[in-house]
Image (spheres, rainbow, N blue to C red):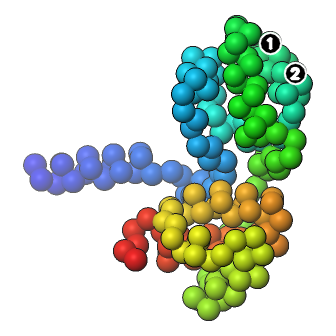
Amino acid sequence: MGLNRISRAAIALLILLPPVAAQGRRSTRPQVSRPDGEVWNVIRKNCTRCHGIDDYAFFALDGPGWNSLLESKHKANGGYNLSDADRKTLVDWLTSKFGPETKPFPRSYIPPEITTFFSDPEAHRLLERACTKCHGLDRIEMSRYPEEHWRVVAVDMRERGAQLSDEELERLVEWLGRVWGTNQDK
């Protein structure tokens, strides 16, 4: 009886685990903070039944650009009906958050597999070189994220000008997840 329960648990665990080939590939999606108030009501009512709000971060458009994108993408996918007031609310928010002065999140990033890992001094040297041009290390040291969130942050910072190769980025992400991940008590 006990073995039967163990067997069922092992089978359930195997079903839930991703295939070995997929374990090395990690997708990177932007993480967009949900807006509050009327903007969130418009997005919830009109957008989230088909896609998440992180999709917006792949673009950097002005008002007419956002209007054009909304028209073209949504007509191709069966259309949508935004009232004039909802459209204005949405386009104003999109332009303020993802306007032409912002840098869109990259559409593709396939993290390379790493076989060497940063020591604390190596990671600190890279942080000093790549991150402190724009902000202090205290901002990073105060953050606690899982590895995937650190990857999103690092890819975004690289898009904003941080000088990081793919390998440096992945080694840094691994180190940040290990040292300043969500399970750390600091």
Q: Residue at x 77, y 49 (%)?
A: 105
Between 54 and 83, the one lying in front of the other is 83
Q: How many marks?
A: 2
Most distant residue in the bottom direction? 121
Circle 1 sits on which residue? 75
Mark 2 belongs to which amino acid?
Answer: Ser
Of pointers 1 and 2, the one earlier in the residue sequence: 2
| CA distance separating discs 1 and 2 | 11 Å
> Where is residue 176 shown, x and y percent of the image?
56, 73
Residue 155 location, quadrant: bottom right
Q: Is residue 1 above or below residue 163?
A: above
Between 22 and 88, the one lying in front of the other is 88
Q: Give neighbour class at mark 2: few <14, some 14-19, many 20+ (Cα, 10 Å).
A: few
Q: Residue at x 74, y 33 (%)?
A: 94
Q: Is residue 54 above or below residue 114?
A: above
Between 165 and 82, the one lying in front of the other is 82
Q: Which mark is residue 179?
A: none
Most distant residue in the left direction? 1
Q: Give neighbour class at mark 1: few <14, some 14-19, many 20+ (Cα, 10 Å).
A: few
> Where is residue 24 shown, x and y percent of the image?
61, 61
> Where is residue 180 shown, x and y percent of the image?
50, 73
Circle 2 sits on which residue? 68
Q: Is residue 16 above or below residue 129?
A: above
